[in-house]
Image: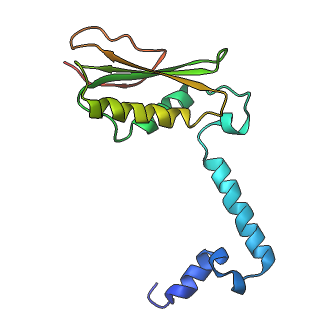
Amino acid sequence: MSGVAPRALEESMHPRLFIGRTRPDLRASFDRDVACAFRRSLNFTVRQHVDAIPDRSQLLLTLQRALLGAVHSQLRQASIELDASSQLVRVRFEYDGEPDPVVKESCAVAATEVIADFPAPWDLDVQHRVVPCPERLVGLKHVAYRRAEL
């Protein structure tokens, strides 16, 4: 990169940034490519086909992605299930003792990120349960996170 001027490098990578110097057909092609890449990056086929129901792996991945940076030592388990007939996404967080408000809020934000992957008619049911260790956990249909316990 030492021989390439920074502005020339930017022009070659981002033709839209230099509209006056690019041909209109290149700008349209660039815009179309960016829009297609964005559509491909969406998590669920639910966004593309409203009637589609996400499968087990999609549900687990959306909750696991939402939990990145939100898992605290008090969280024992996070699980998810889908009720397609009532278009309801249910997320359950189980804690070791009464959770701190910060921990509970962090999990609530993660649940909000989960429902953001679904189109408008879907609703969210968030459950926060206190299940002190070593009591048995009762998760929903799909367990996305479970703390290692001895």
Residue 143, quarter of the rendered image? top left
Percent across and percent down for residue 40 are 65, 48
Question: Is residue 26 left or right of 41 when viewed as pictured?
Answer: right
Compared to residue 86, the image places residue 70 above or below, namely below
Q: Residue furthest left?
A: 150
Up/down of 40 relative to 138, above or below? below
Q: Residue at coordinates 67% horizontally, 61% vertically from top-left?
A: 34
Q: Is residue 63 left or right of residue 150?
A: right
Residue drawn at 76 percent across, 68 percent down = 29
The furthest residue to the top: 136
| Position of the C terminus by quadrant | top left
Identity of the residue drawn at 56% across and 80% down: 10
Q: Could you tell me residue 16's position as x and y percent?
A: 66, 75
Q: Where is residue 78 in the image (x, y as percent from the top left)?
A: 39, 24
Q: Nearer the viewer, residue 103 or 46?
A: 103
**80 left or right, relative to 123:** left
Q: Which residue sits at x=71%, y=85%?
A: 20
Total marks in image:
0
Pinpoint residue 3: horizontal percent, then vertical percent: 48, 91
- Scheme by which the image is coloured: rainbow
Residue 117 position by quadrant: top right
When the figure is inspected, residue 110 is found, relative to residue 96, above or below; the finding is: below
Which residue in the rendered view is the most extreme toward the right?
A: 25
The single residue placed furthest to the front in the displayed view is 101
